Amino acid sequence: MERNTRTNPQTPQTPPASPTIPDRPTGEMTGQGKLVFRISTAGGAIPLEGAQVTLRKFRSASDGNGGEVVAVLYSGPDGKTEIVTLPAPPRSFSLEPARDGAPVPYALYDADVNLDSFFSQSYIRIPVFDGITSIQNASLVPLPENGYSQGLRPDSEKFYEGESPNL
């Protein structure tokens, strides 16, 4: 059986390299995106009021830039924070496929969510797109009733009597 070895001059011989997406968006931040947090527990069934959300610029591992606090938000009775408007690259950056060196069409942010009696949660690399309102869900897990993450109460410490005393 003869194999077709002809090549089409319009078809590249090797597949293009996959694009490298940088740690943080490059280029201008002339757009605006919006972000709201929805804080709940019980798998999203119960909204949590009073949770603090500290929103920061994404801290790039490659250059160490970022980490500045952008906003501190609090969840209301419905578990939602107010909507915050954030700088983002222009929407036009998303009109072409990603390629090496091209700016990405989103801005990146980090957030820490805290509420008394619940484990804290951190969200890293939250994308924000120009012209879009994004919802970041955070389902918090309650701490054990005694407040100790290992589930031990102070009066249930363990004492081992089997060792010989140092005399």
Image: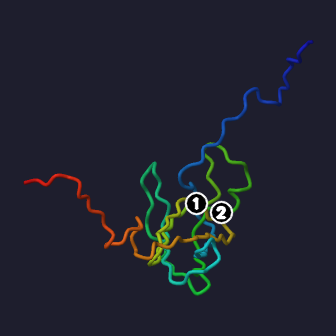
| Residue drawn at (56%, 54%) of the image | 26
Q: Is residue 21 above or below residue 135?
A: above
Q: Which amino acid does label 1 sit on?
A: Glu
Residue 144 locus on image (x, y percent): 45, 72
Q: In which quarter of the image is residue 15?
A: top right
Helix, strand or loop at label 1? It is loop
Residue 79 locus on image (x, y percent): 59, 81
Q: Is residue 12 left or right of residue 101?
A: right
Q: In which quarter of the image is residue 39?
A: bottom right
Residue 116 locus on image (x, y percent): 44, 78
Residue 112 locus on image (x, y percent): 48, 68
Q: Mark 2 points at which residue?
A: 90
Residue that sits furthest to the left in the current view: 167
Residues at marks 2 and 1, CA–CA distance in whole angstroms = 8 Å
| Residue drawn at (51%, 81%) of the image | 74
Helix, strand or loop at label 2? It is loop
Q: Mark 1 points at which residue?
A: 28
Residue 59 is tagged as: none
Q: Which amino acid does label 2 sit on?
A: Pro
